[in-house]
Amino acid sequence: MEREPLGVVGVGWVGLVTAACFAELGHEVWARDIVPEKVESLSRGEVPIHEPGLPELVAKNAERLHFTTDMGDLLERTRLLFVCVDTPPTYSGDADLSRVEAVLGELGDSNEHALVMKSTVPVGTGRSIQRRRDGVGYVANPEFLKEGTAVGDFMKPDRVVVGANDESEEYADNVEALYAPLGAEIVRTDVASAEMIKLASNAFLATKISFINEIANVSEELGADVREVARGMGLDDRIGPKFLQAGVGFGGSCFPKDVQALKQLAGNSGYHFQLLTAVVEVNELQKRRTIGKLQKHLGPLPGKEIALLGVAFKPNTDDVREATSLVLAGRLAGEGANVRAYDPVAGRKAEDMLAGASIAESALEAVDGADAVVLVTEWPEFAELDWTGEVKKRMRVPLVVDGRNFLDRDKLVAAGFTYEGIGR
Ligand code: UGA
């Protein structure tokens, strides 16, 4: 049986991973983005984002992967359109659906295509589109991939969610069949529930992080070690060990946005989602707690030299959206400190966003003459630095605030460092 080619609209993180992985599964894929430079570089085989394994996958499947700026190409060649455009937060916290609307506009009146919505959209979006566009095929197929492990997450998902309403069940069957080779559990449900599964999953994980961060903060006061606490809690099957790492708060393009969006969505429906208000607030405070830890040891910060290790919101990505580093750099600049930041891949990208900070070319350059090092992102190379030798020699004051409990505290303390972790 000849397989029909698949369309992907929007070639960001989700779109590119989706396109490359479906190509890897043997499909012809047409992917469209409105940014000509992106399409040109992808057509040359250059991947514009830092995502492990993705350049290899794109290269390996180059023959089956086609990139274009022309929506006409997609409409002509494909029937299923995986919509992967971004839905960033508006000022009010609602999701901005203008890019989704633009795709609908480009579809015209044709009902020959079905939209498979991978973008994260408010609950109710699918229904509203179907109401307005009588007869259009619509399948909700939210994405759960994590940046940094996106290819593996796509190929070995915990579950695949496929939501459809009566008139689109046939399209949903097609979508289900596309994922069948992955062998994952398929959650077949209605559109609104599929939309809610996505938002609720992200909101729950964010809640888990804010929860453990609060346990960490209390542990600091009461003499417990949050890593031990998380280990003990995580062995309970009902809790699970993942997403219990205390740190300097969650960032990225998803958790902050989706928590806010769900809160807002609930509010618009007349329900005050109390828990999520706290999740957001705890996260904001967590990002700023580092300042207090620095002041505790250094006193007032004007003129102090602070090295930020890590700019990306987490390791293995060059994404700096909602990264804690940006908030910290801003606060430190506000306190009068001089900040030098280093990130293995995201430094230059973030230059304009790191209020007043300068970008170092290496971790050692960043720590040179520093009164404190703040480790913001747990890049593996930071663990391998020669802390007790070269780093200590270069620093003016051997103070480390380890925002991810990532470094070997005992070794640092034995070498004469003052060490501040999170929740220990
Ligand atoms: C998140 C979800 O994990 C994905 O399932 C989802 O598909 C994605 O959002 C999305 O909606 O597109 P992502 O934002 O790539 O993925 O990153 P995560 O690995 O989930 O990390 C988010 C933030 O939480 C990072 O800042 C990380 O440092 C922080 N985090 C994570 C912690 O502070 N502690 C933890 O234990 C885990």
Image (tube, rainbow, N blue to C red):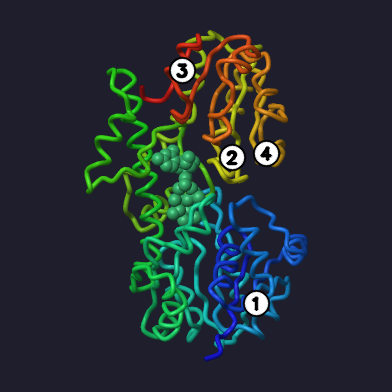
Instruction: Report, in whole angstroms, how far the alpha carbon at label 1 lies from the one at label 3.
Output: 60 Å
Residue holding disc 3: 411
Kind of residue indicated by mark 3: Lys
> In terms of secondary structure, where does tag 1 sit?
helix
Tell me what residue is drawn at x 34 percent, y 67 percent.
193
Q: Look at discs 4 and 2 and give the one toward the viewer.
A: 2
What is the crowding at mark 2: few (fewer than 14 residues within 10 Å), some, or many (at least 20)? many
What is the crowding at mark 1: few (fewer than 14 residues within 10 Å), some, or many (at least 20)? few
What x and y, as percent, mark residue 44?
Answer: 77, 64
- Of labels 4 and 2, earlier in sequence is 2
- Of labels 1 and 4, earlier in sequence is 1
What x and y, as percent, mark residue 105?
Answer: 62, 75
Residue 257 seen from this side: no
Residue 26 seen from this side: yes
Q: Of 143 and 337, which appears nearest the observer?
A: 143
Q: Is residue 291 above or below residue 418?
A: below
What is the crowding at mark 4: few (fewer than 14 residues within 10 Å), some, or many (at least 20)? many
Checking the image for residue 106, the label placed there is 1
Judge from the rendering whether residue 361 lies leftward or rightward of residue 226; answer left or right. right
Kind of residue indicated by mark 4: Ala
Tell me what residue is drawn at x 35 percent, y 39 percent.
244
Instruction: Report, in whole angstroms, how far the alpha carbon at label 3 lies from the one at label 2.
Output: 26 Å
Judge from the rendering whether residue 34 lies leftward or rightward of residue 166; answer left or right. right
Instruction: Report, in whole angstroms, how far the alpha carbon at label 1 lies from the one at label 4.
Output: 33 Å
Kind of residue indicated by mark 1: Glu
Residue holding disc 4: 350
